Image: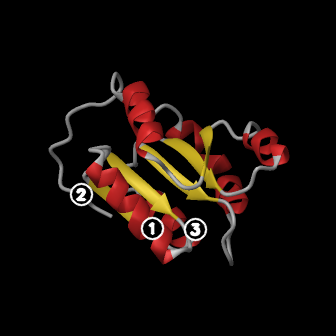
Amino acid sequence: MKTYLIDDDALAIYLNEHLLRTEGFSTCICTFQSAQGALDTLLEKTKKVPKVVFLDLNMPMMDGWEFLDALTPHQEALRGSCRIYILTSSLAMQDLEKSKQYDLVAGLIHKPLDARELQELKARLVDEMVADDEPCDC
């Protein structure tokens, strides 16, 4: 299952990528320290759309909300094939409420990711997963 991990913190990317692999969540993980870089890659017509995107909210240049706003014109094409999970250290209820305004956002996960959460998420997605023999293209 192709997974995007978008976070400006290199250590968070390293730890989350390791956890995703260790827990067998995904073997095709594309990491981005820039939301703009992830957006550009996601919208490339030649790339396979990721099944899951883990998106940090607080990033320089383009934050997670701006990333979601930029995807709005493309949401019909992505709906059903790409689920976005917001990763945040914020406990603000306003983030949860705001995330509900975006159809592509499937949930909000408080940092750090943990094995139990990943297993629960994988179990919810397992019915939708299709064997993927294609090479990982990030």
Is residue 44 visible in this depiction of the protein? no
Q: CA distance from mark 3 to mark 2?
A: 20 Å
Disc ID at residue 136: 2
Measuring 56% from the left and 73% from the top, which residue is drawn there?
Answer: 8
Chain-order first, disc 2 or disc 1: 1
Q: Quadrant of the N terminus?
A: top left
Chain-order first, disc 3 or disc 2: 3
Q: Residue under label 1, please give it.
A: 13
Label 1 or label 3, whichever lies nearer to me, is 1
Task: Name above or below for residue 97 compared with residue 37.
Answer: above
Q: How many marks overall?
A: 3
**Residue 126 position in % (x across, y down):** 33, 27
Kind of residue sitting beneath label 3: Ala
Query: Label 2 crowding class (10 Å Cα cut-off): few <14, some 14-19, many 20+?
Result: some
Where disc 1 sits, the SS reads helix
Measuring 33% from the left and 60% from the top, which residue is drawn there?
Answer: 18
Kind of residue sitting beneath label 2: Cys
Query: Label 3 crowding class (10 Å Cα cut-off): few <14, some 14-19, many 20+?
Result: many
**Residue 23 position in % (x across, y down):** 30, 45
